[in-house]
Image (cartoon, rainbow, N blue to C red):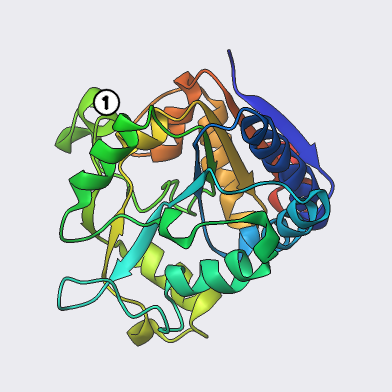
Amino acid sequence: MPLHWIRADDYEAMSSLAAGCMFAAIERRAGQRQPMLVGLATGNTMLSLYERLAGMLNRRNLDLSQLHTINLDEYVGADGQWISADHPLSYRGYMQKNLFSRFDSKLGMNHEHIHFPNPTQPAALDEWIRGKGGVDFQLLGIGFNGHIGFNEPIPEAGISVEAYGALPSRVVGLTELTIDTNARLTAGGDHSKVPRHAVTLGMEPILAAKEILLLACFPQQREPLLKLRQGRVTPELPGSYLINHPNTTIIYAEDQVGLEKGS
């Protein structure tokens, strides 16, 4: 099935559509009383979505006892461990503030069901995911350089298309563009606050997800999305691997991304 593109007028419209998609997926699985694995992303893109999603789940009083969340990534400090959850850039802290703390306790969310790739044993999460039958629903953003998670672009001369798509969860060094972007968006422009490494969910477990939803709402995402539309899979544009995924939807905020303005 080809990629499903949805045009939203603006950020709030994108967030509303995305929240509805995620809620529907969680509600379907909750009704089956079976474990559900939901992959989560962070960043400014997801802020309104998470607020809306928590509100929808609380209003429906949906049973979340079987929900497992798997975050794409977390920063790694110089000691090779996760940065502290109270670090201003920590994704563990971000998720607690922007989503998990908003859940009504009556929903029964088990905080032992919150998973992040561990920098000391990143492959263990891949094995656990496979043992559970794979991720049911994966939420993604796309980096200004086309990365998904912290799977950064690699020149085609350095890795085959197949090998890149099979990359496991691992610790990675971040590109200067990613560091600059994250400094500007989340660290007040202070590059020194942005760690140089992160642990990321690999391409293999991401692409094995049964359903993927990617959101875009920044002008800088226009170029990678236009390249993605060209239909060529390349490790130089990690997001292009979604082209061959059987169930991926991309929702973009047209007022910022401007995909309909022509190339």
| Amino acid type for the residue under numbered disc 1 | Val
Question: Against 75, is 204 above or below?
Answer: above
Question: Against 38, is 178 above or below?
Answer: below
Residue at mark 1: 161
Provide the secondary structure element on which disc 1 rests. helix
Give residue 68's position: percent from left, percent from top. 48, 47
Asked if one can make out residue 235 in the rendered structure from this viewpoint, the answer is: no
Q: Is residue 37 left or right of residue 217?
A: left
At 64% from the left and 39% from the top, the residue drawn is: 26
At 69% from the left and 49% from the top, the residue drawn is: 257
Quarter of the figure with residue 105: bottom right
Give residue 150's position: percent from left, percent from top. 35, 53
Question: Against 165, is 105 above or below?
Answer: below
In the orientation shown, which residue stands out farthest toward the top?
Answer: 1
Give residue 19's position: percent from left, percent from top. 73, 47
Asked if one can make out residue 108 in the rendered structure from this viewpoint, the answer is: yes
Count of numbered circles on the image: 1
At 36% from the left and 32% from the top, the residue drawn is: 132
User: Foreground residue, 112 or 175?
Assistant: 112
At 58% from the left and 50% from the top, the residue drawn is: 221
Quarter of the figure with residue 73: bottom left
Quadrant assignment for the N terminus:
top right
Q: Is residue 184 left or right of residue 7?
A: left
Quadrant assignment for the C terminus:
top right
User: Foreground residue, 259 or 194?
Assistant: 194
Q: Is residue 29 left or right of residue 104?
A: left
